[in-house]
Amino acid sequence: MSAIAVPDRTDFLAGFSNTGSSQASQDIQHKMVEAMSNLRRAVIWSHADDAVTSLEEVFGECSVDGWDGYDSLRIDQATYNEAYKLINALPSWLPLPEIVPEPDGDIGFEWCYGKNKMFAVSVEGKGQLNYAGILGLGNKVHGTEIFDGSIPESIIGYISRITE
């Protein structure tokens, strides 16, 4: 007879501890890890799906020069690709941003939680994130970070501060 030990937790995504040594126990552990991984991907994809839809709409509407009726630059494919990567790098627990086109051809991601709680990140397709925010009365930040496919902890921290 084989057995697998399952922790007494309400967070079923936290993982399982296998105390069994038989092949059947190992097989069950492997299947549980695989199932949790698939579920995690489904949750994250569902979370990001709305943002991807919004990104596609922005790109479709703003991929020609003068999209705003003035002298705006078009959003190019490299910027779209970088924005897509940013969406997929967002932790699933973080609220989704509003996705906005910028007249200089960048794509902006905005989190707004009142007059003194705002944060924005822009991508331009060159491997960097430009950001600015008001993190409470008198607390302002701005800067640039390298974007290599994962969002720097500093930016995650700033967004977390305004969404608490």
Image (spheres, rainbow, N blue to C red):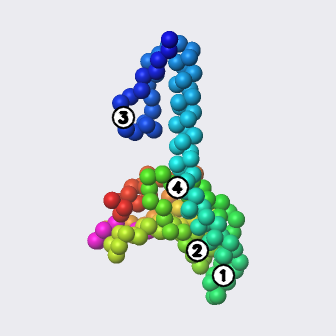
Q: Quadrant of the C terminus?
A: bottom left
- Residues packed near mark 1 inside 10 Å, few (<14), some (14 to 19) or many (20 plus): some
The answer to the question of whether label 4 and label 3 lie on touching residues, with beta carbons closer than 8 A, is no
Q: Quadrant of residue 116?
A: bottom left
Viewer-side residue, 136 vs 19: 19
Assess whether mark 1 and mark 2 are in contact (beta carbons under 8 angstroms): yes
Closer mark to the observer between disc 3 and disc 2: 3
Asked whether disc 4 touches disc 1, contact meaning CB atoms under 8 Å apart, the reply is no
Residue 80 image offset from top left, x and y in percent? 65, 64
Nearer the viewer's eye, disc 4 or disc 3? Answer: 3
Q: Residue at x 41, y 60 (%)?
A: 159
* Sequence-earlier tag: 3 or 2: 3
User: Which dot marks residue 101?
Assistant: 2
Query: Is residue 147 visible from the viewing direction of this image?
Result: no
**Residue 70 position in % (x across, y down):** 63, 88
Question: Secondary structure under badge 4?
Answer: helix
Say what secondary structure mark 3 lies in: loop
Which residues lie in the magenta part? 132-138
Name which of mark 4 and mark 2 comes first in the sequence.
4
Amino acid identity at mark 1: Trp
Vertical arrangement, residue 1 with respect to residue 65, above or below: above
Identity of the residue furthest to the left in this view: 137
Number of the label disc, if any, that sits on residue 47: 4
Image coordinates of residue 105 in percent, x first then y, are: 62, 74
Residues under labels 1 and 3: Cα distance? 52 Å
Q: Identify the residue under disc 3.
A: 9
Identify the residue shown where x is 47% and y is 68%. 110
The residue lying furthest to the front in this view is 1
Q: Residue at x 64, y 66 (%)?
A: 56
**Residue at which label 1 appears:** 67
Is residue 133 rendered magenta in the image? Answer: yes
